[in-house]
Image (cartoon, grey):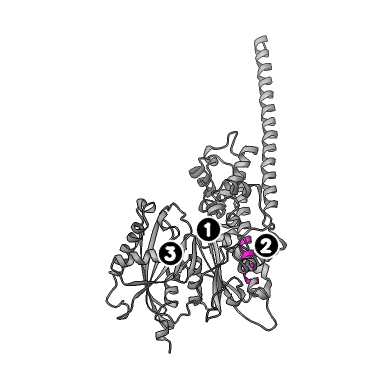
């Protein structure tokens, strides 16, 4: 072999050795990075831990805060708002009732025909209407005239067989999902608008008064019988179908709970005690906070960057608005510190709220052997491709940790309510059944969340108490529930009772 050939061979061998060394170094480096990713995951899992002992402390703290909120205004992070609903539907209600559901950029009008114990809901119809954007920042009269006009058109579609009895006013339940200071079953002043509304001259006004004036201007003879929030409506819908329903919880984009309290157990209530002896309390439980909540650095950063820092801490840990965002923040840290997606952090991953809970739910539920759904979501939403199966499994782990913590904390909150009502244990020989009505997209569509929440409920209550507690899906509280509350608070009830 000539000198040139020998020289080339040596150079070639050296190049091969250098390349091999580079591969080994890269492996060591990448395995070091993988170890860092796993340590971030392990630390996150530990910080999110919800053992039974911790959940029982959360449930106890919820009960304590409920007592404090009922004792005085501002006495607790829980507002414990008196809803003035003291008559929940029984199933005996008959007649034609309307509901109006205003909670965002669309509103719904509903008509429900109730047939009493035998026929129940004979017929229901609804129509959804978009609010023109300019009315969301216009005047109060313009906004409510738009709503009343749609209501009048809808009333005009009543069939011959569906009319209110002669000489009677039509009655309506009004679900208004904005902060209101309720002053009676059918009045409440708007504290502030949210969700993009800025109709300044409505603030401080009675929203039922505003709607009533618009209804009159539209030439409609209709009375607003009940002003309700969607959680109270869910409770009404649940009670209508099952007299054992004592509480309702919404787990959707946001979260809230309402329950039936004994009127004499509300020290801040200074009015006459209702005949029924009961009062529905709107807890506003999203604002619950306690030192026992397993908060992480990601929750603290999410809260600090939110529109309402320090508020709605419980909601930020358990509701659909935030679960996907917590997952994104964990993945962002892994991308920054462990380069799980390569040397640069994918630009899309840096965008807050780009990863929504329906996306993380789809990834969490992926049963394909190669986690194809996870790969597709990463590519479509975050523009991340060529991920390894190992990495996709890691991402599913993160989704699981976030959903599990949220579901278990939701269950602890429910146990707190049952504790307050004395229904978390079985008294000697007592077999009092209690049911909790649930609604909301998170509960309805995120199967693993729902299953985990229900299993945790039974775990915390124990076998014996669990036998007396049922969880039921109560659909469309903001619609049917509001119509049912118009029926149970109808001005004509006394007329019909013997």
Mark 3–mark 1 CB contact (< 8 Å): no
- Which residue is pictured at 47% across the width and 54% down the height? 194
Residue ranking furthest to the bottom: 498
- Which residue is pictured at 59% across the width and 35% down the height? 342
Q: Nearer the viewer, residue 375 or 315?
A: 315
Q: Is mark 1 on a helix, strand or loop?
A: loop
Residue 12 position, x and y percent, is: 65, 19
Q: Mark 1 points at which residue?
A: 254
Q: Does the magenta stretch include residue 302?
A: no
Q: Mark 3 or 1, which is nearer the eye?
A: 3
User: Distance of mark 1 from mark 2, alpha carbons?
Assistant: 19 Å
Question: Which circle's residue, 3 or 2, is located before the other in the chain?
Answer: 2
Residue 347 position, x and y percent, is: 53, 37
The majority secondary structure of the magenta stretch comes to helix
Q: Which of 52 and 299 is in front in this view?
A: 299
- Which residue is pictured at 44% across the width and 76% down the height? 489
Give, as a single range, the part of the protein colored magenta.
409-419
Q: What element carries label 2?
A: helix
Q: Mark 3 points at which residue?
A: 206
Asked if one can make out residue 474 in the rendered structure from this viewpoint, the answer is no
Question: Which circle's residue, 3 or 1, is located before the other in the chain?
Answer: 3
In the rendered view, does 50 fall on the left or right side of 309? right
**Quarter residue 333 falls in:** top right
Q: Name the residue under label 2.
A: 58
């Amino acid at each position: 072999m000539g000198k040139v050939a020998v020289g080339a061979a040596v150079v070639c061998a050296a190049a091969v050795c250098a390349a091999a060394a580079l591969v080994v170094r890269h492996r060591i480096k990448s395995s070091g990075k993988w170890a860092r990713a796993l340590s971030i995951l392990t630390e996150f899992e530990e910080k999110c831990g919800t053992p039974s002992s911790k959940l029982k402390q959360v449930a106890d703290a919820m009960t304590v805060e409920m007592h404090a909120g009922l004792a005085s205004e501002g006495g607790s992070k829980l507002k414990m708002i008196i809803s003035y609903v003291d008559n929940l539907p029984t199933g005996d209600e008959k007649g034609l009732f309307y509901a109006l559901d205003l909670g965002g950029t669309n509103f719904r009008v509903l008509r429900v025909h109730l047939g009493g114990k035998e026929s129940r809901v004979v017929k229901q119809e609804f129509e959804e209407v978009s609010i023109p954007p300019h009315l969301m920042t216009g005047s109060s009269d313009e906004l409510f005239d738009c709503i009343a006009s749609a209501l009048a058109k809808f009333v005009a579609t009543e069939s011959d067989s569906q009319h209110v009895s002669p000489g009677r006013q039509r009655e309506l339940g009004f679900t208004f999902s904005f902060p209101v200071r309720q002053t009676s079953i059918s009045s409440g002043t708007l504290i502030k608008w949210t969700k993009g509304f800025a109709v300044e001259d409505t603030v401080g006004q009675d929203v039922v008064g505003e709607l009533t004036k618009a209804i009159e201007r539209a030439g409609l003879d209709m009375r607003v019988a009940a002003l309700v929030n969607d959680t109270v409506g869910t409770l009404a819908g649940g009670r209508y179908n099952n007299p054992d329903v004592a509480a309702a919880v919404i787990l959707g984009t946001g979260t809230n709970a309402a329950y039936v309290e004994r009127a004499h157990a509300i020290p801040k209530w200074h009015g006459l005690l209702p005949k029924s002896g009961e009062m529905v309390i709107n807890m506003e439980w999203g604002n619950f906070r306690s030192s026992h909540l397993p908060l992480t650095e990601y929750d603290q950063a999410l809260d600090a960057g939110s529109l309402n820092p320090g508020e709605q801490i419980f909601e930020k840990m358990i509701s659909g608005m935030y679960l996907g965002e917590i997952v994104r923040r964990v993945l962002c840290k892994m991308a920054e510190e462990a380069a799980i997606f390569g040397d640069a952090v994918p630009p899309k991953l840096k965008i807050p709220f780009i990863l929504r809970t329906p996306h993380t739910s789809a990834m969490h539920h992926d049963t394909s052997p190669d986690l194809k759904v996870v790969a597709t979501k990463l590519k479509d939403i975050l523009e991340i491709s060529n991920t390894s199966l190992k990495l996709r499994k890691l991402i599913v782990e993160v989704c699981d940790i976030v959903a599990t913590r949220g579901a278990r904390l939701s269950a602890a909150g429910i146990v707190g309510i049952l504790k307050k009502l004395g229904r978390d244990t079985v008294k000697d020989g007592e077999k009092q059944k209690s049911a909790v009505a649930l609604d909301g997209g998170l509960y309805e569509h995120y199967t693993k969340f729902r299953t985990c929440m229900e299993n945790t409920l039974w775990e915390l209550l124990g076998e014996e108490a669990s036998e007396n507690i049922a969880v039921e899906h109560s659909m469309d509280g903001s619609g049917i529930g509001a119509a049912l509350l118009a029926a149970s608070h109808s001005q004509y009830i006394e007329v019909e009772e013997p």
